[in-house]
Image (spheres, grey):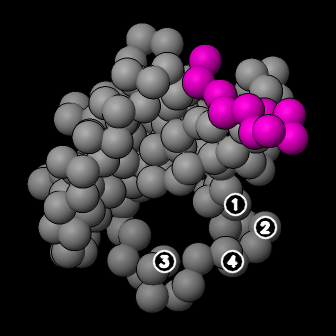
Amino acid sequence: MFQVVFPSGRKVVPALMVIDMQNGFVSKNGSYDKLGMNTSNYREIIPKLKELIDFCRTKDIPIFYTEAVKEASGIDVLTKIHNFLPKSRQERLKFPICIRGTWDGVTIDELKPGEHDPIVIKRRDSAFQDTELRVWLQSEGINLLVFT
């Protein structure tokens, strides 16, 4: 694993976080595209992001992926408990997006996680809330995150 040791003896162990680069958010015919949202800016970053991922792989820098998913039943949306989406976004979501186990919910092929890359399944906007990410980072001694 890649690490930097400063003269003070402090070790820095980095990891790359690839956040929600899923078909539903990025791809043509994904949920966001079907909702009429402009997803071209998401696709524009793919080549540079791929370069960064490839660089991290050559340096043995761990890469963590997040996938924001929902259940088809909508049980995890929690609209009966609180209203966490802006009204304008609620009105646009006529159908569930990024359903777990569907094409819409997985990372795009161009940035597909490697066999040993951890995938953090998110039920909320934060990769840290109600996920195993903190434990995984601690177990690897990672103390510097680069988010993409």
Q: Residue 92 sits in which quadrant?
A: bottom left
Q: In which quarter of the image is the C terminus?
A: bottom left
Q: What residue is disc 4 on?
A: 83
Verify CB contact (< 8 Å) between mark 3 and mark 4.
Answer: yes
Residue at mark 1 to residue at mark 4: CA–CA distance: 8 Å
Verify CB contact (< 8 Å) between mark 2 and mark 1.
Answer: yes
6 in the magenta segment: yes
Disc assigned to residue 57: none
Relative to residue 134, is residue 36 drawn left or right? left
Disc assigned to residue 81: 2
Q: Earlier in the sequence, mark 1 or mark 3?
A: 1
Disc assigned to residue 90: 3
Q: Name which residue type carries label 4.
A: Asn
Q: Position of residue 126 (x, y in %)?
A: 67, 56
Q: Where is residue 80 in the image (x, y as percent from the top left)?
A: 72, 67
Q: What residue is disc 1 on?
A: 78
